[in-house]
Image: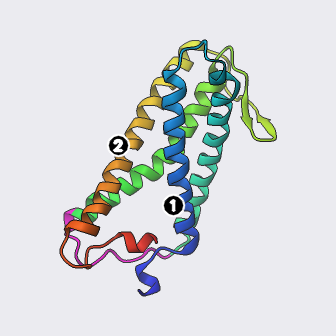
């Protein structure tokens, strides 16, 4: 496989790190919001860990955008139809955008909550840049949740496309997974 047929090593590492973070954050978010408020772990460690790794996901997403902008992207496999390339590009750009926007909505949600414990980031606390406002909090909460599930749907579509090209298309001409391994 030629170098122009693969993403650069930094892009591949950022892709898989971002994928693990996003899936983990969605799973943790779903778990913690499903638990009753009487569950101590929900507020003692789940929310703080979700916030910390959400900020990390934002930073890695921003770095990934910068690295992507400065990297030569591999060519699309010859076996892809034009509509598949268009759909692939749309899904990839939407996922990249949501990898930035979803954590920002989470930060805005936490920052605007009037009873917020702050936004922890491992060894420090980040400043809350928005004033406490429960109405704004509710709007940011809906945006965060809706966009997170939209991102999850796009991830599922992305994975389904990769699997289709890997296992259902004839020959290796449409195999896109090799570009990210």
Quadrant in the rendering for residue 127: top right
Dot 1 or dot 2: first in sequence order is 1
| 11 left or right, relative to 46 | left
Which residue range is magenta in the image?
A: 72-83
Check if residue 90 falls in the magenta segment: no
Badge 2 local density, few (<14 within 10 Å), some, or many (20+)? few
Quarter of the N terminus within the rendering: bottom left
Residue at left 64%, top 50%?
A: 59
State whether residue 38 appears in this view: yes
Q: Which image quarter: residue 80?
A: bottom left
The image position of residue 60, as x and y in percent, is 61, 54
Q: Which mark is residue 86?
A: none
Q: Residue furthest bottom?
A: 2
Q: How many discs appear?
A: 2
Question: Left or right: 142 with respect to 116?
Answer: left
Find residue 42 and report its image quarter: top right
Main secondary-structure element of the magenta-colored stretch: loop
Q: Is residue 82 left or right of residue 132?
A: left
Residue 118 in picture, x, y percent from top left: 73, 26
Question: Is residue 22 shown above or below 5?
Answer: above
Q: Residue at 65% of width from left, 24% of height from top?
A: 41
Q: Name the spot of residue 99 as percent of width and height, x first.
A: 50, 47
Q: CA distance from mark 1 to mark 2?
A: 17 Å
Q: Which mark is residue 15?
A: 1
Query: Does 80 lie within the magenta span?
Result: yes
Say which element carries label 1. helix
Q: Are marks 1 and 2 in contact (CB under 8 Å)?
A: no
Relative placement, left or right, of 124 versus 11 is right
Which residue is tagged 2?
Answer: 153
Q: Front-most of 39 and 57?
A: 39
What is the secondary structure assignment of the residue under circle 2? helix
């Amino acid at each position: 496989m030629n170098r122009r047929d693969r993403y650069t090593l930094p892009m591949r590492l950022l892709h898989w790190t971002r994928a693990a973070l996003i899936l983990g954050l969605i799973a943790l978010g779903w778990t913690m919001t499903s638990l009753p408020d009487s569950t101590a772990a929900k507020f003692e460690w789940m929310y703080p860990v979700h916030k910390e790794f959400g900020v990390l996901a934002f930073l890695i997403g921003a770095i990934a955008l910068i690295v992507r902008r400065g990297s030569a992207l591999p060519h699309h496999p010859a076996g892809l139809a034009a509509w598949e390339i268009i759909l692939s590009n749309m899904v990839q750009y939407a996922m990249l955008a949501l990898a930035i926007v979803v954590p920002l909505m989470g930060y805005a949600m936490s920052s605007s909550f009037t009873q917020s414990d702050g936004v922890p980031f491992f060894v420090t606390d980040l400043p809350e840049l928005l004033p406490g406002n429960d109405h704004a909090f509710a709007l940011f909460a809906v945006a965060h949740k809706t966009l997170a599930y939209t991102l999850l749907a796009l991830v599922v579509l992305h994975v389904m496309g990769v699997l289709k090209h890997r296992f259902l298309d004839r020959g290796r001409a449409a195999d896109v997974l090799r570009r990210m391994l």
